[in-house]
Amino acid sequence: MSEGNGMGGERVAVIGAGMGGLAAALSLAARGFRVTVLEKADQPGGKMRAVPAGETLVDGGPTVFTMRWILDELLAEAGFATDEHLRLTPLGVLARHAWDGSDGVFDLAADEQASAEAIARFAGAAEARGFRGFAARAAAIHATLDRTFMRAARPNPLTLVGRAGLEGLARLWGVSPFAVLWDELGKHFRDPRLRQLFGRYATYCGANPFTAPATLMLIAHVEQRGVWAVEGGMHTLARTLGLLAERAGATFRFGAEVSEILIEGGRVAGVRLADGERIAAERVVVNADVAALSAGLFGEAARRAVPDQGRVPRSLSALTWTGLARAEGFPLTRHTVFFSRDYRDEFDRIARGHLPNEPTVYVCAQDRGDDGSPPGGPERLLVLVNAPARGDRGQPTREEIERCEQATFALLARCGLKIAWEPGAVRRTGPAEWARLFPATGGALYGRDLAGWRASFQRPGARTRLPGLYLAGGSVHPGPGVPMALMSGRLAASALMADHASTRRCHRAATPGGMSMRSATTEPTA
């Protein structure tokens, strides 16, 4: 991307071109702010990265795209239409599921009626009735929390009740705010396979199904409303957002690592790059894990601007294999999950800091659709298992990773899937590599752990204690995942614009004629 000139107005530096930073940059640039996005990598996307494999690129991060209406709203507010810039195809099969031990194969459909009928064939009429009750409850949770929690500036229990109003109190209580997901699933499903299937939704947020709040059932409703395949891969979504932000006036600088957030007069004054260059800005949006701020990686003043994250429990990490391969013997769809035989033991081991002896395995076959037709040659695959976020503590060890790799592909083989990687076209990434890519996280890919009902309220919001400093990304409210990260960027932009408007009103009252804004500058190091 080339550098653009913006449309005049206050200068904003956005640190990080992940989904939250891209959303904030697009929103602010479209409204006249002079936005400069500083990204240490050579491409946009953050965790939504593209991994080279031979002559092609493979999605090496998020692979499931839901809640497209959030993207539609973001682009429409900036004057763009999604369908004019991206080709999104709705999937009829949300995911295919298989169980070790020949316990069957089950496809969860985007159509609720089709899923209920399939469950009746797979596990019986009683389980189909349980699914209908579960689906209704998931829809009710989503309807209750959409405006009051997910789209709201950082909520707490009191503001949540206030937004719901007297009529909404009963609905809030109905979302089972204090219940645990695994326990609540047992009220809907007796078949352990279905409990395992829907319990896996906790991992979408990097959480343990046995400690996560029951409110995560809303993810099932979100998927029923649509899962889309992005033509060209998920990284195309990131690149497109970057291009549109640039068209709106934002400037992108890649290979630009920020080492310090500068403070003058008790508020943000810009940033300093690792090479010493200083970039002046009246406001800064940080699209990095809040743990990096808390650890002092952006300076002491910025560290004090956020709550200490040193003892915050971490979400899951992952062990992944990404590359080109020939897959035979099992009819993969775009999203396929192979479940372990002992789900509780899997997460108990992760909670103790170890890789599972027998992991549940997710396979994304990027070149396949609903019918599972193979591409007729090597295809792009991402294979993923959950892992503890202890990459900065020397865990898991290489020996443990090797054992887990053997167990992973042995499970796939027992289910009938044989994967032959193309020579030199596969990359393994574990917690240590994620920790290096995203410092201060230990490899946690979703921010703090969502164990217990309080955790959702303990994520920082867009505003910080330091005037002019704002937060975006999956580690802050409303949480992890592509649509939530986009929402966080919109919330950061909204908070910044509200504070900017308030500041201008104050200055107009004190100085008739308004405030004269300086032109954007890049200043030499003092």
Image (spheres, rainbow, N blue to C red):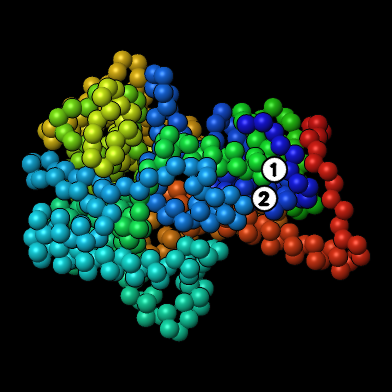
- The reply, left or right, for residue 414 in relation to residue 113 is left
Type of amino acid at the residue the image marks with label 2: Ala
Q: Is residue 270 visible?
A: no
Which residue corresponds to mark 2?
30
Residue beneath the point at 15% across and 55% down: 118
- Please state which of residues 440 and 316 is positioned toward the viewer in this rendering: 316
x then y, percent, for residue 109: 24, 53
Q: Can residue 497 be seen in this view?
A: yes
Relative to 113, residue 418 above or below: above
- The crowd level at tag 2 (other Cα within 10 Å; few <14, some 14-19, many 20+) is many
Which residue corresponds to mark 1?
249
- The crowd level at tag 1 (other Cα within 10 Å; few <14, some 14-19, many 20+) is many
At mark 1, the secondary structure is: loop
- Please state which of residues 52 and 214 is positioned toward the viewer in this rendering: 52
- The reply, left or right, for residue 469 in relation to residue 8 is left
Residue beneath the point at 78% across and 35% down: 522
Q: What is the residue that sits farthest to the front in this orientation?
A: 84
Give the quarter of the figure containing the C terminus.
top right
Residue beneath the point at 39% across and 51% down: 66
Q: Looking at the rendering, which quadrant does residue 404 occupy?
A: top left
**Is mark 1 in CB contact (under 8 Å) with mark 2?**
yes
Q: What is the residue that sits farthest to the top in this orientation?
A: 423
Measured in 3D between alpha carbons, the distance from the residue under mark 1 to the one under mark 2, in whole angstroms, is: 7 Å
- Please state which of residues 391 and 255 is positioned toward the viewer in this rendering: 255
x then y, percent, for residue 45: 51, 38
x then y, percent, for residue 503: 77, 62
Q: Looking at the rendering, which quadrant does residue 288 occupy?
A: top right
x then y, percent, for residue 196: 20, 52
Type of amino acid at the residue the image marks with label 1: Gly
